[in-house]
Image (tube, rainbow, N blue to C red):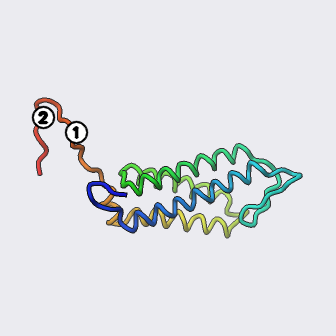
Amino acid sequence: MKRGGGSAPGTVVAAGVLLVLKAALGFWLALVLFAASRAHPRSFLGAAIHRRVRGYGVVILLLAIASLVIAVELFRLRPWARTGAFVLEGISIAAALTRISARPGQVVVSLAFSAAVILLLLTSSASSALEKVPSRGPRPPGSAPPSG
C-alpha cells in the first residue's frame, strides 16, 4: 500500500474495497451463470437463472478479475489503476443501464457502487496520491538532470 513512504489515502482505500466487493459479486454471478440449467435453476441476489449463459459468465468473470487487479493496484498507488477503474466503471454503468427495465433495484445498487468508486477517485486526495511520479531511472546521455 505504500509508494515513496506514503500510504494510500482513505478515498483510494475505500474505492479499492468497493472494487474488491464488486469482484466478489462478479465471481459469484459467474459461478451461478456457469452452473444454472433448466433442470437446476440457480439464484443470484433474488433473481432466478434457469439456463446456462456461459458467454455472459466469461465476460463477468473477466470483469471481476479486472476489478480485483485494479483494486490491488489502487492499494499500491499505481497511477494507471485510476484510469483503469474509470474505464471499468464506465463499462459497469453501460451494462447496468441495459438491464434497468428487468431489475431496477439491482441496477440502482450497481450504479451507486460505480458512482461511489468514480467520486472517491475524483477527490483531491486520490488525485494527488495517484498522480504520476517522474521516473528516476537512468537518463539518456546529454540530457539535463530533472529540476527540483
Name the residue carrying label 2: 143
Q: Secondary structure at mark 1?
A: loop
Q: Which residue is mark 1?
A: 137
Closer-to-camera residue (9/94): 9
Identify the residue at horizontal 53%, vertical 53% (top origin): 67
Q: Residue at x 63, y 48 (%)?
A: 61
- The answer to whether the residue labelled 1 contacts the one labelled 2, judged by CB atoms less than 8 Å apart, is no
Q: Hey, what amino acid is under mark 1?
A: Gly
Q: Is residue 44 left or right of residue 50?
A: left
**Badge 1: residue crowd in 10 Å (few <14, some 14–19, many ≥20):** few
Residue 135: image location, x then y, percent: 24, 43
Q: Residue at x 39, y 68 (%)?
A: 10
- Is residue 76 rendered to the left or right of residue 98? left
Residue 88 disc label:
none
Label 2 Cα neighbours within 10 Å, binned few <14 / some 14-19 / many ≥20: few
SS at circle 2: loop
Query: What residue lies at 33% left-to-right and 62% top-to-bottom?
Result: 7
Q: Where does residue 17 sit, x and y in percent of width and height?
A: 49, 63
Residue lying at the far right of the rendered structure: 39
Q: Position of residue 47 (x, y in %)?
A: 76, 63
Q: Residue furthest top?
A: 141
